[in-house]
Image (spheres, rainbow, N blue to C red):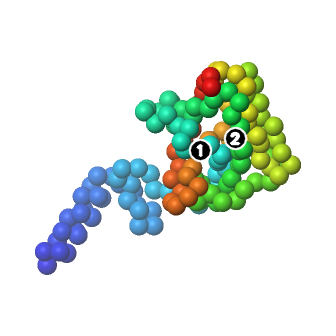
Amino acid sequence: MHRSFACLSVLALLAASGCESTTGCFEIDGPCLSSSPVPRTFIFGFDPATLDRSAPVNANGYRAVLPVGASVTLRAVRDANGEVTEATDTLRTVTWTLSDASSATLTPSADGSAQLVTTQVGRVGTISANGTSILYACATTGLRACSAVGAIDVVAR
């Protein structure tokens, strides 16, 4: 009796608060997602050890710090559910762009990857692959822990 009263009380509270319900989802602290997950493409290749984790550089993530002459192989990887830690579909046909080549060059390869080579001290421009510029540094052993890369700074050796 006590349990059914508590359940009825919760349902009455939800109804009174104006929450909407769709397929068992109650909109209490955010909208219910009624659509399918959206596939997303991410750019991988940065070593997590290059990140300055003292504080996020911007809303997009941490600052990667690379010395002049460093080389990083980048790959565009997609996941059907938009989950960065589960992305495994490496794209083979990729259009790579670099918005500002004053501190680095970006050279696409036939296999879909691109080689980023730092050339002088400064901030690397925005890198994009097929229109996305979502960069991540992910561990390659154990659990795939990933950190977002918000900027890439080139420093003297």
Q: Nearer the viewer, residue 54 or 9?
A: 54
Amino acid on which the number 1 mark rests in the picture: Asp
Which is nearer the N-term, disc 1 or disc 2? 1
Q: In whole angstroms, how far apart are the C-alphas of marks 1 and 2?
A: 9 Å
Q: At which x and y percent is residue 5?
A: 17, 71
Q: Nearer the viewer, residue 96 or 38?
A: 96
Residue placed furthest toward the bottom: 1
Identify residue for label 1. 47
Residue pictured at 51% horizontal, 60% vertical: 143
Q: Is residue 13 visible?
A: yes
Amino acid on which the number 2 mark rests in the picture: Val
Q: At which x and y percent is residue 57?
A: 50, 29
Q: For the N terminus, give its image quadrant.
A: bottom left
**Quick one: SS at disc 1?**
loop
Q: At which x and y percent is residue 7?
A: 23, 69
Circles 1, 2 touching at the beta carbon (< 8 Å): yes
**130 left or right of 25?**
right
Identify residue for label 2. 72
Q: At which x and y percent is residue 129?
A: 73, 42
Q: Nearer the viewer, residue 135 or 74?
A: 74
**23 left or right of 81?**
left
**102 left or right of 38?**
right
